[in-house]
Image (cartoon, rainbow, N blue to C red):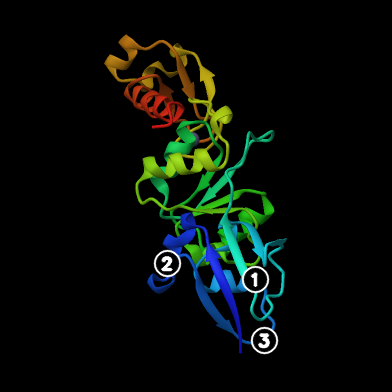
Amino acid sequence: MKVAYFNIEDKLRWLLPQDKRRDNFDYAFNGPQSVKHLIESVGIPHTEIGEIKANGESIGLDHLVQDGERIGVRAVEPAGEQFTEPRFVLDCHLGRLASCLRMLGLDSLYRNNYEDRELVQITVDEDRILLTRDRRLLMHKNISSGHLLRSLEPKEQLKEVIQRHGLKKWIRPFQRCILCNHPLEPVRKEDVLEHLQPLTRLYFEEFHICPACRQIYWKGSHYDRMQKIIEGIEKGE
Ligand SMILES: [Zn+2]
């Protein structure tokens, strides 16, 4: 039996079992074990791990932990400004978050019946970031980019995603269909007139349409709500 001494940054401690939520804990293990395996076995998916040190030296996830080693684990750092647009896939409990992200123009695949293996496949094949509250899913060996959401509340989840993935400069409201994620196109009022309610006809001039599902969008009450959310994000509220 070998023992390693862990120090986990406090930001990550909510993921640990109660008896390990303190500055340091001992962890006994058998055989050769990677530091990734040991950290995941106490509840922290590799997607949430930032810098790791063994006896003060930086190490990688595949480092084999030695008997008596002191392991320091930091949370993943928020990404800086992104030069390519980050894209997401969301697990089936995150429908409201998916709508919020799409409202901000962020490419976010979502269905309420994705199976775990499909989520993993899409994440890998399409180079997307997997958003979920299921930490077991993020421990899948093929997942390299994922994010375990802490909050249960969609607005808080949205803030978590924007902060961690450097999304501010990618926010483009009214560019994407909230229902199906397809990019929207401008449409002339006279071409959609027959689908509009009388008050909408009266008060709005500018319209967009989703070419995939034919949903029509205009800057009505949705838009005001969305503007408030965006302002909140920009002020860091
Ligand atoms: Zn659509």
Q: Secondary structure at mark 3?
A: loop
Q: Quadrant of residue 96?
A: top left
Residue to which mark 3 is pinned: 31
**Residue type at numbered disc 2:** Arg
Residue 237 is left or right of residue 137, and the answer is left
Residue to which mark 2 is pinned: 21
Other residues around mark 3 within 10 Å, as few (<14) / some (14–19) / many (≥20)? few
Extreme-bottom residue of the structure: 1
- Ligand 1 within 8 Å of disc 2? The answer is no
Name the image quarter holding the C terminus: top left
**Cα separation between marks 1 and 2:** 18 Å
Q: Quadrant of residue 22?
A: bottom left
Residue to which mark 1 is pinned: 35
Q: Please tell me the numbered disc located at residue 139.
A: none
Name above or below for residue 139 compared with residue 234. Answer: below
Other residues around mark 1 within 10 Å, as few (<14) / some (14–19) / many (≥20)? many
